[in-house]
Amino acid sequence: MKAIVVMFDSLNRHMLSPYGCKWVKTPNFERLTKQTVIFDNCYAGSLPCMPARRELHTGRYNFLHRSWGSLEPFDDSMPAILSSKGIYTHLVTDHKHYWEDGGATYHTRYDSFEFIRGQEGDPWKGEVAAPAYGDTVTNRRNKAARHDWVNRKYINMDMEFPQSKTFEAGLEFIRTNAATDNWLLQIETFDPHEPFYCPTHFKDLYRHQYNGLPFDWPLYREVVETADEVEHCRYEYAALLSMCDYNLGKILDIMDELNLWNDTMLVVNTDHGYLLGDHGWWGKNVMPLYNEIAHIPLFIWDPRVQAKDERRRSLVQTIDVPATLLDYFNVAIPEDMKGIPLRETIATDQSVHDAVIFGIHGREVNCTDGRYVYMRAPCVPDNQPLYNYTLMPTHMRGYFLPDDLAGVELAEPFSFTKNVKLLKVHVEGKYDYNRYGTMLFDLESDPGQFNPISDSLVEQHMIEIMIHLMQENDAPTEQYVRLGLL
């Protein structure tokens, strides 16, 4: 038995032709649907990047207990579990966050890993002199943008792009090991995450009239750009997405060539989606988690089931992916893993969740039962009380500061921490998460989530579901307090 996971970052399902997009060119995603089961109701759990990846290791939510950070000593890591059972695991990726303080414990859970440099603001090439910043719409001049301007000088030809190198490294692993058994390969590209930089011939697929400044890196904020700039940036994303589609085709080609469909699971997924001016926003972090962000694509081929070219309506989530892979390799699923294997869902559309929750630590807690989406906002202006619970006090690119740790307490174990106490670190509110307040959407009548509804009976039902799922996942008491659920 073998398995290949192809993971994209910030892949918006609404921009894929299998999910109804009429103008973005993704023929290999269409081809993928002919070989897999496509899930129509898959949701992210914890956002953004590394919180989602912690879920892909542990099969349980991250966002109720801590923000962006490392795997914890008590975490059950899916690739590490497979490795302990004789399943060789390999990661090839250009996702730079694995090599920062807040992601440094993830890639080392695999038996081997290969890192491709140069994405976004990866501190890759060293140039002391300040780069010649070009004039752009956003003209970012922070440290990440500085590195990006340097990196682009070394990335021009197709095979110089980190995404291309990542897929080629994945293909090399497949060719080297196709004749052997018992391995998991994760091919993970940072694309189509911003900046939307790709070879010109992909941009040529979306020729359009635009005479403004270059614009392929929107800031996470409300849209202040002109309509022409928004349209242009959407085309830039589409071009990069078509590049992703092109490289996905190489994986399908090699599976055909080496007849891997008989004994190899294929999972194609993402961590979350992305707002491209939708709802008046760019990005995915500081705004409500609309379905363009939270409702994500998922495709799975399971050779045990042989189901393909079929759609599944059952509600599934990121936390189900590691359980599905462990089940596929006949490895016991840890009791702390809340995800559920999707074998029967793939086969018969068997339901595994009546509802799911999702969110970002300290933000709204969101809940959906597939029809309604309920976004429960903090009930007090300062969004308190709020704490991080961790034994790995790291943020994205640095440690917790001494001031953060000055008043630290030692918290009693949670149900999943294996009797280990944790640091309880107070978190000051940084964003105005009460700006939109609590919102309830009926996806049946309003799939675009343009018009929040007021229905006390439905809201009370969604509150009951939310509380049940928070209890099931051992949410700390203050989460209920700050949301006004106590």
Image (tube, grey):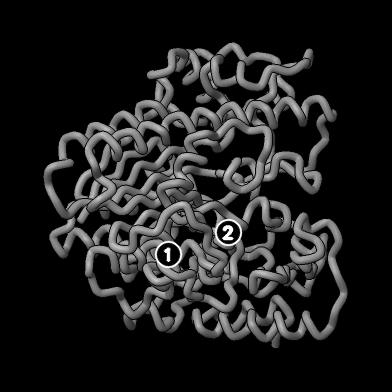
Few, some or many residues within 10 Å of mark 2 (<14, 14–19, 20+): many
Q: Position of residue 438 (x, y in %)?
A: 79, 70
Residue 40 bears which disc, if any?
2
Residue type, label 1: Ile
Q: Nearer the viewer, residue 417 or 156?
A: 156
Q: What's the residue at 76%, 40% (across, down)?
A: 277
Residue assigned mark 1: 346
- Which image quadrant: the N terminus? bottom left
Label 1 SS: helix
Q: Is residue 465 left or right of residue 380?
A: left
Q: Position of residue 437 (x, y in %)?
A: 81, 66
Q: Nearer the viewer, residue 435 or 439?
A: 439
Few, some or many residues within 10 Å of mark 1 (<14, 14–19, 20+): many
Q: What's the residue at 64%, 45% (across, down)?
A: 274
Label 2 SS: loop
**Residue 449 lies in what quarter of the image?**
bottom right
Q: Position of residue 221 (x, y in %)?
A: 74, 43
Residue 400 visible in this rendered orientation of the protein? no
Q: What's the residue at 35%, 50% (across, down)?
A: 266
Find out whether the residues at labels 2 and 1 contact each other: C-beta distance under 8 Å.
no
Q: Nearer the viewer, residue 404 or 91?
A: 91
Residue type, label 2: Asp
> Compared with residue 178, is residue 301 higher up or lower down, i.e. above or below?
below
Q: What's the residue at 33%, 83% (across, down)?
A: 419
